[in-house]
């Protein structure tokens, strides 16, 4: 028996003790807990990163679609305002006597606007004039009263050069008052857009900005510019949203204006932060358009998660590594941006703008106006350089203090900013001195454009700053045309200033143009 005892003792010594087993269990439990913690942590990080990626990606896509739709709306509003200004500034009574005269006017505008399908003018007695793009030219229609219930409509087709190709007459009972665009323009004071409607005489589905022409508050006519709905559909379809995704534009009443998917649900609205929410495997975005062009449209996007956030399927380890690197790089970039970019951006902005009004300063005026004049010289556009000055401004400062003077300067700047387009140049060049450089285009006669600009500024000043009205502050404007004084900014400014000074010596509060002799001599 004795030979076996050592082996028995050996087996007994090699077996783990209860304490050792307890320690191993504790370590194993800790490792399992750590592994579970890391797994859950990685899962949480993955989910959070995927959601953030989803929000960033979808927000960017929404920005792209919104920008394109906004440009579509603003281009339509710009064309309509040109038509409205031409009708409002012209003699509507003469047009009303013979609507045939409206055809050439509308055709001249439409010729330069390929994106516009047609332009319409409707009178309050139901008559209508319209010009539309057709294959190889234009088609003009206008109506005259045939009897109490019908109209005699003249239809004329023109080739691309505007030469008459054919003419016919037919009877119709369609009144302008019954059209969607007339009702949209008559209902709202200002610009508004129709819901999609089917064309009566030319096939297609259209949307149209419309605006009423009023005389002492009484509606006399409505002008409209029609756009094919398919154009808007193609704009939103052109954005790569991914398979199973859709973009839809609806009114506030959930009427579909255009959609990249005919089966899209217009009632599916997002309610989450930033207009983004997730319902199951689908992500929704809702955003009201910010275009100041008379629309109440809402953009709605719908996309499956996998089309927007493929990184959600990546492994937790890769996500953690990429997140660490991304955070490090992002921190470095942010630190560099905070240190260098923001001061540089602020310095650049300060060097180009007037600190009180935010308009261009003299240096920026020279740079931007030289570029505008050079482009106008190349394409033969007519450019007006206007110098504005506040009459009795010193009286305002002396009587009511410099705070009132500053508010008057800001009111004038805001009025000029509202009265000009983004491509125009508006600057403050001195205490109460302003300069506007603009292309005339279809805005009207230069003298009329100059007086409108002056009158709008003077009205905004009087209405917005009571002290200015009390001090009798008014606005005088002098202007010069590039066609007379050449395309040199210095020469144009000198001519405009001379017209302003000479004009003020005669009568303040008016617009004065540089004489041909003065303009050609500078």
Image (tube, rainbow, N blue to C red):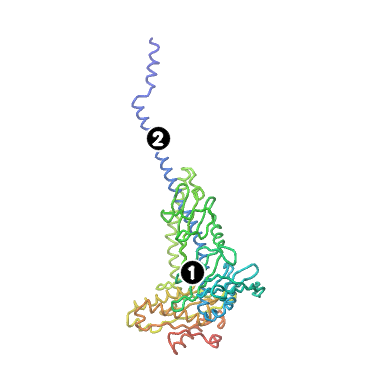
- Label 2 secondary element: helix
Mark 1 or mark 2, whichever is nearer to me: 1
Estimate how packed mark 1 is, as few (under 14), some (14 to 19) or many (20 or more) residues with alpha carbons within 10 Å: some
Q: Which mark is residue 437?
A: none
Q: How many labels, in total?
A: 2
For the residues labelled 1 and 2, say whether their Cβ atoms are less than 8 Å apart. Answer: no
- Which residue position holds label 1? 183
- Label 1 secondary element: helix
Marks 1 and 2, how far apart in space? 73 Å
Residue nearest the observer in this picture, 148 or 501: 148
Estimate how packed mark 2 is, as few (under 14), some (14 to 19) or many (20 or more) residues with alpha carbons within 10 Å: few
Residue nearest the observer in this picture, 15 or 72: 72
Q: Quadrant of residue 32?
A: top left
- Is 23 positioned to the left or the right of 504 in the image? left
- Is 110 positioned to the left or the right of 19 in the image? right
| Dot placed on the residue nearer the N-terminal end, 1 or 2 | 2
Pinpoint residue 401: horizontal percent, then vertical percent: 32, 79
Pinpoint residue 477: horizontal percent, then vertical percent: 46, 82
- Residue, x 42% and y 71% (percent of image)? 358
Residue nearest the observer in this picture, 493 or 214: 214
Which quarter of the image is occupied by the C terminus? bottom right
- Which residue position holds label 2? 32
Residue sticking out furthest to the top: 1
Does residue 470 appear in this view?
Answer: yes
Please say if 33 is above or below 346: above
Pinpoint residue 204: horizontal percent, then vertical percent: 58, 63
Residue sticking out furthest to the bottom: 506
Residue nearest the observer in this picture, 394 or 211: 211
């Amino acid at each position: 028996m004795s030979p076996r005892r050592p082996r028995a003792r050996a087996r007994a010594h090699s077996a783990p003790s209860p304490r050792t087993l307890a320690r191993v269990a504790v370590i194993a439990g800790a490792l399992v807990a750590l592994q579970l913690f890391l797994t859950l942590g990685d899962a949480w990080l993955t989910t959070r990163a995927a959601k953030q990626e989803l929000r960033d990606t979808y927000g960017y896509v929404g920005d792209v679609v919104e920008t394109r739709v906004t440009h579509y709306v603003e281009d339509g509003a710009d064309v309509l305002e040109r038509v409205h200004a031409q009708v409002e500034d012209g003699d509507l009574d003469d047009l009303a006597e013979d609507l045939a005269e409206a055809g050439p006017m509308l055709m001249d505008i439409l010729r330069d606007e390929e994106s516009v399908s047609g332009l319409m003018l409707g009178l309050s007695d139901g008559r209508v004039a319209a010009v539309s793009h057709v294959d190889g030219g234009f088609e003009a229609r206008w109506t005259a009263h045939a009897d109490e219930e019908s109209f005699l409509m003249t239809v004329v087709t023109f080739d691309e050069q505007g030469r008459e190709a054919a003419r016919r007459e037919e009877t119709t009972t369609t009144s302008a008052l019954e059209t969607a665009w007339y009702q949209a323009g008559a209902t709202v004071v200002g610009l508004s857009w129709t819901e999609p409607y089917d064309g009566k005489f030319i096939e297609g589905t259209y949307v149209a900005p419309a605006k009423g022409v009023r005389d002492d508050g009484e509606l006399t006519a409505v002008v409209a510019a029609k756009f094919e709905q398919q154009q808007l559909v193609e704009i939103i379809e052109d954005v790569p949203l991914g398979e199973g995704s859709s973009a839809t534009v609806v009114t506030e009443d959930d009427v579909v204006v255009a959609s990249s998917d005919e089966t899209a649900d217009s009632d599916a609205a997002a309610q989450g932060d930033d207009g983004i929410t997730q319902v199951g495997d689908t992500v929704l975005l809702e955003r009201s358009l910010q275009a100041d062009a008379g629309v109440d449209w809402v953009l709605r996007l719908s996309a499956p998660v996998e089309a927007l956030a493929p990184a959600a399927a990546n492994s937790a380890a890769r996500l953690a590594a990429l997140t660490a690197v991304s955070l490090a790089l992002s921190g470095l970039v942010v630190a560099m941006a905070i240190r260098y970019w923001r001061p540089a951006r602020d310095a650049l902005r300060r060097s180009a703008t007037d600190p009180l009004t935010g308009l261009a300063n003299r240096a920026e005026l020279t740079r931007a106006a030289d570029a505008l004049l050079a482009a106008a010289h190349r394409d033969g556009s007519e450019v007006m350089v206007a110098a504005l000055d506040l009459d009795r401004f010193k009286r305002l400062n002396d009587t009511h203090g410099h705070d009132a003077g500053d508010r008057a300067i800001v009111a004038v700047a805001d009025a000029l900013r509202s009265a000009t387009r983004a491509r125009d140049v508006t600057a403050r060049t001195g205490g109460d001195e302003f300069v506007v450089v603009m292309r005339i285009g279809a805005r009207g006669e230069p003298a009329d454009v100059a007086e409108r600009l002056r009158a709008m500024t003077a009205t905004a000043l009087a209405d917005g700053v009571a002290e200015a009205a009390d001090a009798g502050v008014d606005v005088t404007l002098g202007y010069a045309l590039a066609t007379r004084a050449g395309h040199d900014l210095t020469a144009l400014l000198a001519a405009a200033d001379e017209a302003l000074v000479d004009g003020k010596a005669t009568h303040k509060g008016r617009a004065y143009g540089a004489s041909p002799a003065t303009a050609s001599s500078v």
